Amino acid sequence: MIRQALVSLVPLLCLLACASDPTLTAPPREPDPVDFSGHWELNYGQSDNIQSRLTTLVRELQRRSARASNLQSERGGLVLGGSGTDSAPSVVGLARMAELITSSQLLEVDQGRTRIRIDREGNFALSCDFLRDPGRIDDLGVGRESCRWDGQQLVFVISLPEGLSIRHRVALSGSGEQLGIVTTVFSDQVSAPFTVRRIYDRYEPGSRGYRCEETLSRGRVCTTEGGS
Amino acid sequence: MRPLLRLAVLGLAGLVLAACAGAPERAKPAQADPADAWPPAVGAVTLERSGTPPATALDVIIEVFDTGLAEAAATPGDEPVFAAVRKAEAFYMPLRLREALVESGRWGVVRVAPRSSATAALSLSGRIVHSDGVDLVLAVRAVDARGEVWLDREYRDIAAASDYPVAPGTDPFGDLYRRVANDLAEAQRARSVTRLPTVALLRYAEALAPGVFADYLATGDDGRRELRRAPAPGDPMLARVQRLRNQEYLFIDAADEQYADLVERFAPTYHLWRQYAHELARYETDYLARAGEREINARRGTYAAMQQTYGRFRRVKMHEQDLEELAEGFDNEVTETVIDVDDRVYRLSGSLATQYDEWRRILQRIFALESGGMP
């Protein structure tokens, strides 16, 4: 069972993996972009654990520090001091930010030929107009955002003041039953970004026992499904 | 084997994801503000009403407005333009303008038609340059039956917070419609209009039977039409023209009623949408001012500082998306109104202009048959 799950996960990981390497990127002009439409719920088992990702980041920073200090031993490598770049508050803060940004357990994706909207529970939706110039950046005054296709992946970039940036990379598994979002959070106070991968499983809204819809007059209305 | 496989997969993912983490894209410079090109606001305007009926009451036809979507698409700005709302506004706004003209008491019958018509002594057309809950910018053009341009300019009005919620029988941009009505009244006073109704009738007759009525109107070098000679009273051919023109008016009036009915149904939602857009615009302006003035207390790079920065962005985005959702709801209501009432309303929205063209062709055939010609 686990093996089956892992095997189905491999294409998704490969898709996510190949995005930044130009030699492995899929042909640039895909006739039919992948369709992310549907309802998705967080798969805790296959998603990253923030604590372990933090541990990985700390180790990486230690290695960098050790190299930078030109020390052969590990003893002088720990950099998590009280202030400055790579300080403990900054590194831990970055991890907590990543957790906050990726905390949505449910997604609802509405995608058409010209536009996609990814509604995230408890957060603002990620939306992208495919007809617009892919390099265009919207400036909201409190931050800037852009989106573009990268092969079969959709990439959202949000640049915020105070040296904070967020990148979401969305991909679909080969079976179409899992959605992966790799979120990378950058801070100019930490020398390496923090990356979290969230895996979502497709689900049918009715199967949850209730159904919600937006209405103009009453806002969000949820009703229970008639069970047999 | 399984743990190894899992480790291999996760290790691969970790390596690759670390590789994916590059620097985000650099921002582009912001675009020019289109509002810089708009005219000054009309301000508070009192409608000039005529105490006595005019000696020559000109019939006016207001063509359903151009949505301006083509221009908006050609020059994309930061503000989203909701196509469904614009399409609804294209016949909502002519009706508001019609109200102002009727209330002024200076005109004959004022009709809203799907297309321009040669039957009118005075024809008005308009294009929506910009419309949200804060600003309304309209390009308005008025041309009489002779082809003389009375008015060709842009108008802008700015809604105040006190304009919302919209009270029954009012409009946040009522000043704009009143200004257009006053300008038209002034243009009328500056001209001799006594011959215009006759010119309009003869132009209509000319369209029905060019060979018969061609001699009545002269065309100047500038393309303007002038009355060369008036038809004899009781001319049977002209009587037929008048009867057919009345048939055309019947069609326009039927279409006009349907527009009014549709507007009455969607107006409450539309007002709500504009109020929300107004509140959102004010909130964003105030919020950005506050955000610009405020110091971020927490030290840069800490969770508290990042949370503040992200929270600010999130709030603005969620407000923006609330507006979008409301507009989508409005879009659906307009669409449903058009679709749900079966063919009658579908034709109103989608092909009333085509029906109008067809109706005019039928009238031409009737006229040809009655005149003994070939249809």
Image (cartoon, rainbow, N blue to C red):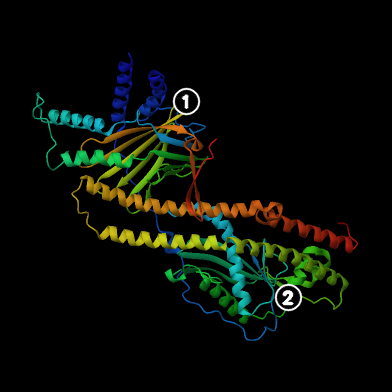
What amino acid type is highlighted by mark number 2? Pro
Snapshot quadrant of residue B141: bottom right
Q: Could you tell me residue A129's position as x and y percent?
A: 46, 44
What amino acid type is highlighted by mark number 1? Ser
Give the residue number, with chain letter if any, for mark 1: A175
Give the SS element for disc 2. helix
Which residue corresponds to the image point at 76% horizontal and 56% vertical from the top-left? B358
B34 relative to A157, above or below: below
Alpha-carbon span between mark 1 and mark 2: 72 Å
Give the residue number, with chain letter if any, for mark 2: B197
Pick the residue in front: A77 or B165: B165
- To which chain does the residue with label 2 belong? B
Q: Could you tell me residue A223's position as x and y percent?
A: 50, 45
Screen quadrant of the C terminus of chain B = bottom right
Q: Could you tell me residue B113's position as x and y percent?
A: 67, 64
A211 relative to B274, above or below: above
